[in-house]
Amino acid sequence: MEVVEVAGLGKTYPGGTEALRSVSFSVHRGEVFCLLGRNGAGKTTLLRILATQLRPTGGQATVFGLDVAREPKGVRSRISVLPQEARPLMMLSAYDHVRLMCMIRGMSRADAARRSQELMEQFELWDHRDKLCADLSGGLRQRVLLCMALSSNPELLFLDEPTIGLDPVGRRQVWAAVRRLTKSGVTVLLTTHYMDEAERLSDRLAIIDKGQLAFLGTVEEAKAVTGAGMRVVIEASNGNGREVLSPKSNEEILAIVQRSIREGRRVTFQPPTLEDAFIRIVGGSIENETA
């Protein structure tokens, strides 16, 4: 049984706005599954439906075999959600955030203390336990929020833009935390606007465009399907300016290199990126807004 199964899922809001149209995919146990799409593409609507926060208007979605529309309580007992807008209370300590969430989940004081220490040690936060969140870096604050989300031992974790606004160090701290989760058996479904994040983390990904599924597969499959190939960067002989080419064959690459050598220009090669594939699939960069 798959962790998540989506079949012909649709969502039309009052007023006629169609956010999702006949979307189908599945998520395997223990993987990081990434949803990519421009703003307004429908990915957050899809996440909210799977997290039982929104009802679909068409199709079906199940989590651990439970229908998200008919059996939301059963689904909620096995998932946790870290929304994009989540923020810690700045004048509360890191430890108190996690401990209080454990108690809200129904644990005794003693069990909450044990679970809090366990989580904070797992995410390398124990040395920061008595610090106010106001005194923590962005990456550490996000790890506090992850601990809170994991207080109930969820089997499936939804992360909506988990590293937005973080510096490169903070983002990598969260990446490492996500990878530790999947190694422990947790399935992670995340949305992100960062192509390098999706490329680094995702086992598989879905690209949503204008409410429809535009691609489903691995990063390497996305590059292969769209024909995103090696790019050749030619530096000007005087060091000012450069030219970026995307040859279609080995013969073209050889001709470019030979010409550059004759002209005394430096040649380097860049492998294709997920961003190259995304642009070819949806016809533009992820920063572009959609209606």
Image (tube, rainbow, N blue to C red):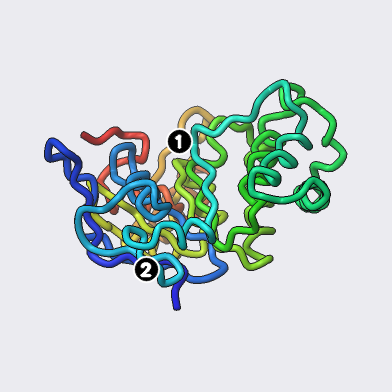
Q: Is residue 23 left or right of residue 4?
A: left
Task: Say whether marks 1 and 2 touch (CB < 8 Å).
Answer: no
Circle 2 residues within 10 Å: few <14, some 14–19, many ≥20 = many
Task: Locate residue 30, reporting x and y percent.
Answer: 57, 68
Residue under the point 42% across and 65% down = 63
Task: Locate residue 68, reporting x and y percent.
Answer: 36, 60
Q: Secondary structure at mark 1?
A: strand
Of the image marks 1 and 2, the number of the one nearer the N terminus: 2
Q: Is residue 167 left or right of residue 125?
A: left
Q: Is residue 87 visible?
A: yes
* Amino acid type assigned to the residue bearing label 1 in the image: Arg
Task: Locate residue 150, reporting x and y percent.
Answer: 64, 51
Q: Secondary structure at mark 2?
A: strand
- Is 62 situated above or below 175? below
**Residue located beneath label 1 in the image:** 242
Residue under the point 71% across and 38% down = 100
Task: Locate residue 129, reporting x and y percent.
Answer: 83, 36
Quarter that holds the N terminus: bottom left
Residue under the point 25% across and 59% down = 9
Q: How many marks?
A: 2
Q: Is residue 172 visible?
A: no
Name the one closer to the observer, 63 or 24: 63
Q: Is residue 173 left or right of residue 74?
A: right
The Cα atoms of the two marked residues, 1 and 2, are separated by 47 Å
Q: Quadrant of residue 142?
A: top right
Residue 5 tag number: 2
